[in-house]
Amino acid sequence: MYDLIVIGGGPAGMTAALYALRNGKSVLVLEKHGFGGQITYSPKVENYPGTIQMSGNEFADRMLEQILALGAEVELEKAVSIQEQDGRKLVKTEEGSTFEGLTVIIATGVKHRMLGLPGENELVGNGISFCAVCDGDFFSGQTVCVAGGGNSALQEAILLAEKCKQVIILQDLPELTGEEALQKILRSRGNVAIETNRKILGVEAGEEGLTGVRVSDRLTGTERTIPCEGLFIAIGLIPENEPFAAQADLNSYGYFASGEDCLTRTPGVFVAGDCRSKSVRQVTTACADGAVAALAACRYVNERK
């Protein structure tokens, strides 16, 4: 039996493992796909304290190497449920395994809602991005498109307008749905174009990455290609927390309704990272959650040993 089972191998999950291991606890990390989570889509990470620049993959590799060196055990399996039994937590996986732990930290993260275009996934990190704070500097002086018209898309566009030559907002609906205050800011910017009733049909690429976005006018059916170096997709995030709703309350958007203490209504079960309800989702806030949740889990274990 492990002192701690971490569900999710992103920055939050691996930071949680790190802190627990350094507190002398036995740790298992379950990751369903590949370690690193969303950060692996970033070709360059330049906003992590103490590091001028590294790739998202390099960051993930360093974190994994660090926790393995401290004795973490890892399994590439998808956790699908948590059950209680005699004070233990039984984590069951899609592959049929059952792992026992005194505590569990759920750090399942989120996934970005995609457009569903051919070749889209291959261009993530090579022209297609999701975060202006993370990647906006890489498009300084260039033309970018923003897919979406809600608050998230408008906030991304405002940040990009400070750096890019031109920002083109592509909204599928007849009008923007974001707050009027954000719309007012964007309409005052001379380098921002707002196009509504635009359906994105596809992306075009060259040897160096994205070169354009193909769109059609929903009213006229006219199609054209917009030359650009970047496409920021801001049409929503998808949390995958439903399997653990029995242990931790979810808000109306499907995020864990947990505060900065990372606690849940189930003693011994904690949440951390982007899967938690929060206003800022960055690699630094994910790591912070991981540390908070791990220290809480360590206190829980110490009180019961």
Image (spheres, rainbow, N blue to C red):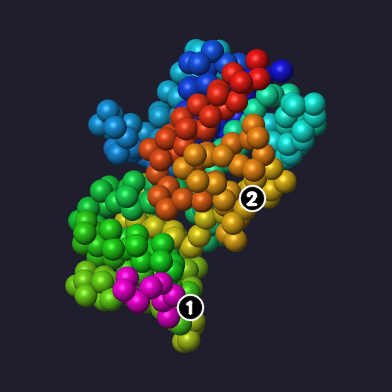
Residue at the image point whose x is 68% and y is 24% from the top: 102
Residue sitting at 32 percent across and 70 percent down? 182
Secondary structure of residue under mark 2: loop
Q: Determine whether, in the image, residue 230 is placed left or right of residue 3.
A: left
For the question of whether residue 145 can be seen, the reply is no
Left or right placement of residue 108 versus residue 188 in this view: right
Q: Are marks 1 and 2 in contact (CB under 8 Å)?
A: no
Quadrant in which the N terminus appears: top right
* Three-letter amino acid code at the position of disc 1: Leu
Spatial CA distance of label 1 from label 2 is: 33 Å
* Quadrant of the image occupied by residue 78: top right
| Depth check, front residue: 238 or 267 | 267
List x then y, in percent, for residue 160.
28, 58
For numbered disc 1, what is the local secondary structure? loop
Location of mark 1 (residue):
173
Which residue, given by chain and number where applicable, does mark 2 sit on?
Answer: 249
